[in-house]
Image (cartoon, helix red, strand yellow):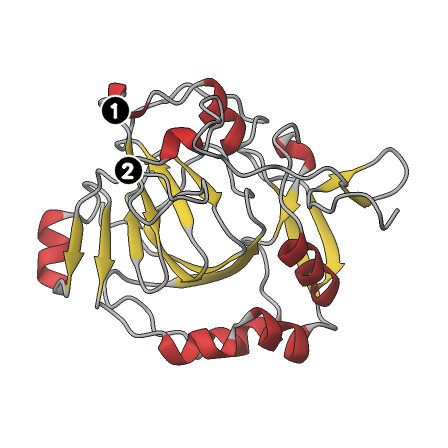
Amino acid sequence: RATEPPSMAFRRGPAHGLLVSLAAITLASSSDEASPLAKQCEVGSGEGQCERRERCNLERRTGMTPEEFKLEFQDKKPVVMTNVNDNREFARLVTLNALKENFGDKNVILSSSNTYSYDKEKMDFGSYLDCVTKNAVKINDRADRTYYMFGDNYEPWLDGLLENYDKVPFGEDHALSFGVGAMMSGVPFHFHGPGFSEVISGRKRWFIYPPGYLPSFEPNRTTIQWLNERYRGSDDNELKECTIHPGEVLYFPDGAYHATLNLDTTVFVSSFIRSSS
């Protein structure tokens, strides 16, 4: 089957555990008005892919102090921050090549990419990295049958790796979660306690509503399907959205429904903190 176009979606088959999907998703071009990615680009590049200037209506802050964070944002609203921590050394430790070389023989837990993320699968990390770097999630894949690495990985080797991560100096009782996602992977709308998400490499697009607001979505439809079917852009007055790049940290408040979409093969760290309320 080597002649078939590669892509990536870990899908549960009736008798085969995890299967690798073989149909690739095509990135948006400037002529593809129906594409969900086309709706995300305020300015398209000459090659037809999104430039860095995607729509972002979240506040951005540089060098925020703990006092400013607590007064203006904690348990209130999301914000994108830079220069609050320094993970340049950690980024060198978690390049895709370094991860495969040093931890490729370890097992990782993959979670289903739907709202509830109840289903879990184990896979060796090296094989998973091979898949996510070569393939993308298909637009027709169901979220409850697509798996990727986020949350629920608490192995000693990963705990040791995360000791090198420079935590955001805000909030209390940080619980760290390490993730790697393929292009077009992500999680549809869900909510949980407050925390931070930092992109180490790649890009992660966030869609987030105010705490207590219930958006329109289907739990087993992927984020890219929601974009194609329900996304209203600037016509949605409640929606905040932004693409997070390496070195940027997004704060998500307690109880805020949010969805994510990895625009590249993306390495990220989530830090869950105690709610001040």
Q: Is residue 175 visible?
A: yes
Vertical arrangement, residue 35 with respect to residue 93, above or below: above
Looking at this rendering, what residue extends furthest in the front direction?
A: 46
Q: Residues within 10 Å of mark 2 (few under 14, many from 20)?
A: some
Q: Of the residues under marks 1 and 2, which one precedes in the sequence? A: 2
* Residue with the mark numbered 2: 55
- Residue type, mark 1 in image: Ser
Measure the alpha-carbon separation of dots 1 and 2: 9 Å
Vertical arrangement, residue 165 with respect to residue 255, above or below: below
Vertical arrangement, residue 83 with respect to residue 205, above or below: below
Pick the residue in front: 70 or 92.
92
Where's the C terminus, which quadrant?
top left
Residue for point 54% across, 54% down? 151
Residue for point 43% across, 19% down? 230
- Residue type, mark 2 in image: Arg
The secondary structure type at the circle numbered 2 is: loop
Residue for point 30% across, 31% down? 209
Pick the residue in front: 63 or 152.
63
Q: Is residue 156 visible?
A: no
In percent of width and height, residue 243 lies at 34, 46
**Residues at circles 1 and 2 in contact by the CB criterion of under 8 Å:** yes
Asked which quadrant contains residue 14, the reply is top right
In percent of width and height, residue 55 lies at 28, 37
In percent of width and height, residue 159 lies at 53, 73
Q: Which mark is residue 234?
A: 1
Vertical arrangement, residue 173 with respect to residue 186, above or below: below
Q: Left of 217 or right of it: where is 124?
A: right
In percent of width and height, residue 32 lies at 49, 26
Pick the residue in front: 115 or 245.
245
Asked which quadrant contains residue 57, the reply is top left
The secondary structure type at the circle numbered 1 is: helix
